[in-house]
Amino acid sequence: MLLLFPPVAKPCEPPAGVAYLAAALQENNIECCVSDANIQGFHYLIRQNLTATDSWSARALKNRDAILADLQDPGLYTNEDRYHQRVYDLNKLLSLAVDTTRFKVTMSDYTDRQLSPLRSRDLIKSADTCRFNPFFSFFEDQLKPVISQWDSPWVGISLCYLNQALVSFALAGWIRKNFPDKKIVMGGGLVSSWMSRPDFNHPFSGLIDHMIAGEGEIPLLDLLGKPGTTKRHYVPDFEFADKAGYISPARVLPFRTTIGCYWRKCRFCPEKAETHAYSTQRASRVLADTLALAHRFQPDTMHFIDDAMTPAFLRALARTGPRVPFTWYGFVRFEKDLADLTFCRQLKRSGCLMLKLGLESGDQAVLDRMNKGTRLDLVSRILENLHHVGIFTYVYLLFGTQFEDRSSAHTTLAFTRAHAPYIDYLNLAVFNLPRFSEETKDLETREFYQGDLSLYLNFVHPAGWDRKQVKQFLDKTFKNSWPSDPGFEKIRPFFPPTMPCFSIRTGRKNQITSTGSDNKLKKTSNRDEPMTAEILSTGDEVLLGDLVDTNSAFLCDRLKQMGIRVSQITVKGDDVAAVCETVMAISRRAKICLATGGLGPTRDDITAQACAEALEESLILNSAALASMKTYFDRRGFELTPDNEKQAWLPDSAQVLENKYGTAPGFSFQLNQCWFFCMPGVPSEMKQMMDACVAPRIQAIQGKPTRLLIRRFTVFGLHESRVGTLLTGFEDLFPGIRLGFRASFPVIEVKLVRDGDEAGNEAETFLDRAGQWVARQLGSKVVSMTGLSLEAEVGQCLARKGQTLAVAESCTGGLIAHLITQVPGSSDYFLLSAVTYANSAKIKVLGVNPQTLDTCGAVHENTALEMAVGARQVAGSDWAVSTTGIAGPGGGPTLKQVGTVCIGLAGPGGLALAKKFEFKFDDREKNKKIFAAMALELLRRHLTGEISA
Ligand code: SF4
């Protein structure tokens, strides 16, 4: 007999079912050949003559051999980023081999947009139209010779998983057409489930000659002329798997020590309704079989695929200890043996890598109602023990059963969080009600998946805790509880190298909000690790030096205010593959990524495309983004062009961030553990978006109140280091308040930040006290107690007094006037600016006495004073300020020191004065800045009365 295991199933280990059948047939002298068409088909697809569709796939194609070799190399499994990249590469290759408008084929998934595996008529159609199946060429090129050579009239197809169903039927249809004399027998886990339906009426007769439910060994032997056999336990034969090229860093072999589950009482589990009797053998016998198997096939790791390994077999392994010649992992129940630390140590010594444990709920009442037979105090001990001895724990949780309500789900969340240090992997699943279980009798049920072969139902939850609410709980509450808890950031980012690697789901969205059985949440036990963020700046113009990336500095500062450390800033050019790769890498390192640039309408704006590729999603025309753009254009009377419309094409799962000051909408999405916020590169647009949309979202992710209490002080006349020294001891005096400095020459901003909370008033008072302390320490160097610039403070003083100002500038070249007019409302008080660079201008415009210039020179207090008095007179203003000095870098005509400035001031009541200052900068720009600031500061002090005439 020829036994076929069809695609698509995980390609990291050989199938167990056909190996057991092969052993049974051979033991009964029936010739048998096994073909793992799953792994063969997988290699066939990626080895075809493929054509690249983008730069990423071109690179993947070029490196085909290296990608496969890497995934079989244990070294890859020490670098999570590279591992994910290789999985992505391989899936990319698979996508090149199929018509992606209809099919999606990855290493763990097979989807046909036209046919459903839950409908018998679609399966029959898959058989009838087998030539359209992505594996059709594989059937023709590789299976045809095998089937042709094999004399036996029987071909067996082992259909275990839903992902195999459509291909299995395409294969059956193809066999039927090409080998009409062959008889097809079909069995396997999925077939058994279909046949367990009371209403199953053999819709495939005519195509499939014989279908087998449950264990196949006895019925198959019966069919092949060996009736009356009763033996149920065999040692599987993996001869066929020898050189198959499984995508795994180690040779992993599956082995089943029992048939069925020894507990079989859990009320939510289809196993309870299983009609075939549970069967096991003496533990010593099972161990002997396991060792014989290991001796023959030399696995590195054994994957025990039992529903639950029996305590007796675990004890047998523990007793054998270091003499077990392989590492192993498998599913166990929370049995009391595991509460014994010594026993756990013995298991570890026997090679145990990881135990998978179905906890289902962290609420004892729910566990009892489920009939789980699990005590939570025992669970705590066991998790702690396993962690202690170094056995990884993989914990399954199940939400939305009829035994649970919202409050129980919260209890589970609390239990899980409390045991976080001892859980290495979490799997969150949403309950599906088995269609023909006893439980359906007590529930009002609804159709869930359409199809005559559907195995599950939806139901009206007795406590109103319906599926939608459960998913929302997982999405919002469960998921959002992790980012606020650094304990759930990754520290153990890798699955054990010997674990079949493709149990890591390759689609990387919503790891926490999982609804399927193989979504996982990785966690760590490093509870003190602060949230980290990264910044990604995109654009060739930054790399070419045409543009200075000031955005990153702004974003670092904003994140710092939120108590978030920026661990890395990356700059990438306009290259989709490079940005995609970076996004994927960041998604596994950081919790937050702020990306700027690449959102515009032109071809080189590639951020959305790159993110879509990283998400493995398509770009879709986002209606919210389009509406926001339309509003922006309408308001300005512009027409929205197709080029602009490109900016509204965003990854499928992206959420829009509104841009009030520009055309490009931003967007956010989650990939792995990281939230990405993509903002425009134009600084004014980016800053608005950051403050209005992104910062509140980040704080929500942090689990912190969205209100920040901030006090800002502007300091002039001190070095940053001196400010730091003067404020030494702040943290001890004012715990909970973050102190920050930002130097923006020649002033320094000192910032005090505290999270607002329900006790808001108390927090404000505490912050005020801290502010008063800071003001005392810095004394007269504080030029603004509210963080205003010097020119804004001057403006406020003038406006308050209803007075006016004129400026006469020489060395500052109009900088003072520029600063003053930067302040909105300055037209109320600013009358005149005279840039009198030449002596002749000083004389002509300001009325400076030529003799003063002759005797004292241009850079002199007397000249400055006459300039100020002249400006005040010409403008008719209340105040006038003047500057004349040497900005450098060379000395002036009088060979005065570079950095010398004379500042004149004229004001009400005949005030007229001038002062000389000497600064030590050789830099022209710095000198101009500090001269202007000094002039403004002198004016401010007189305006406020801090200095009088
Ligand atoms: S222990 Fe697991 S397999 Fe056994 S009945 Fe419970 S849920 Fe089902």
Image (cartoon, grey):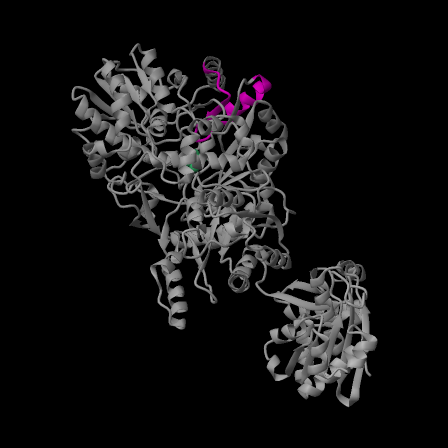
Pick the front one: 658 or 754: 658
Q: Is residue 316 magenta?
A: yes
- The x, y position of residue 477, in whole percent, is 50, 54
Quadrant of the rendered structure where residue 765 is?
bottom right
Q: Residue 38, image x and y in percent? A: 34, 27
In the displayed structure image, the side of residue 302 where residue 97 appears, left or right: left
Q: In this view, does 287 lie above or below 805?
A: above
Q: Quadrant of residue 815?
A: bottom right
Q: Which quadrant holds the C terminus?
A: bottom right
Q: Which residue is drawn at 29% across and 21% down?
A: 142
The residue sitting at 40% across, 72% down in the picture is: 635
Magenta residues, start to end: 297-323
Quick check: 646 left or right of 927?
A: left
* Residue 312, horizontal then vertical, whole percent: 51, 24
Is residue 852 magenta-colored?
Answer: no
Q: Which residue is drawn at 54% across and 17% down?
A: 325
855 to the left or right of 365? right
Out of 450 and 715, give the one closest to the viewer: 715
Using the image, determine if residue 925 lies above or below residue 300.
below
**Eyeballing the image, is 116 above or below 883?**
above
